[in-house]
Image (cartoon, grey):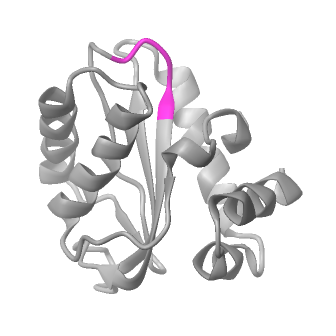
Amino acid sequence: MKLCELLDSAVIKLNLAATEREEAIEELVDVLVRAGRITDRKGCIEALMAREAQQTTGIGNAVGVPHAKHPCITKLTAALGISQKGVEFEAVDDKPAKVIFLIMARMNDPGPHVRALAEIARLLQIPGFFRKLVEAKSSDDVLAAIAAEE
């Protein structure tokens, strides 16, 4: 699974306005709605927040990976948000998230979802990758950073 297959400039948002987890999730879901990738905004937000209620997806090191499944999803989709000031994500290390990968998956099809999460984890282990995302000046810079490592 390559993130380049899930992301394009329409689903990357630099300079997230949100400062709280739920606001960031709503902001990224709105990106997916505008891009025509999801049709049930409210349902997707509810699914994501229900997942967050189970356990935070703030994985630490200034990264959040909110993810959920919803019946309106016909194909795995994702959005990526970058926040310069950070978003309170109730992360395991109590640090705000600056990079947020949001993933929406199909019901009863865990394979692509799990592979996407694994690819995000792999990329974040690459020295300098996180910095390239946070310092990106455009969506094209973000996509180039991802493509260079995939």
Relative placement, left or right, of 8 versus 29 is right
Task: Reply above or below: 51 against 36.
Answer: below
Q: Which residues are magenta?
A: 73-77
Query: How many badges with numbers are in the image?
Result: 0
Q: Position of residue 61 (x, y in %)?
A: 48, 80
* Residue 148 to residue 1: above or below: below
Which quadrant would residue 86 be assigned to in this image?
bottom left
In the image, 41 versus 130, the foreground residue is 41
The residue located at (72%, 41%) in the rendering is: 4
Q: Is residue 95 left or right of residue 115?
A: left
Asked if residue 76 lies in the magenta stretch, the reply is yes
Residue depicted at x 73% and y 65%: 141
Of residues 112 and 45, the one nearer the viewer is 45
In the picture as drawn, the residue positioned furthest to the right comes out as: 148
Q: Where 140 falls versus 54 (above or below)?
A: below
From the image, give the main secondary structure of the stretch colored magenta: loop
Left or right? Give the position of 13 relative to 91: right
Residue 62, horizontal then vertical, whole percent: 44, 79
Q: Residue at x 39, y 33 (%)?
A: 104
- From the top left corner, tell me how far across and down residue 148 is, in percent: 87, 58
Q: Quadrant of the N terminus?
A: top right
Q: Residue at x 12, y 37 (%)?
A: 46
Above or below: residue 3 compared with residue 121? above
**Residue 104 located left or right of residue 18:** right
Q: Position of residue 120 (x, y in %)?
A: 61, 53
- In the figure, residue 122 lies in which quadrant? bottom right
Quadrant of res 38: top left
Q: Is residue 107 magenta?
A: no
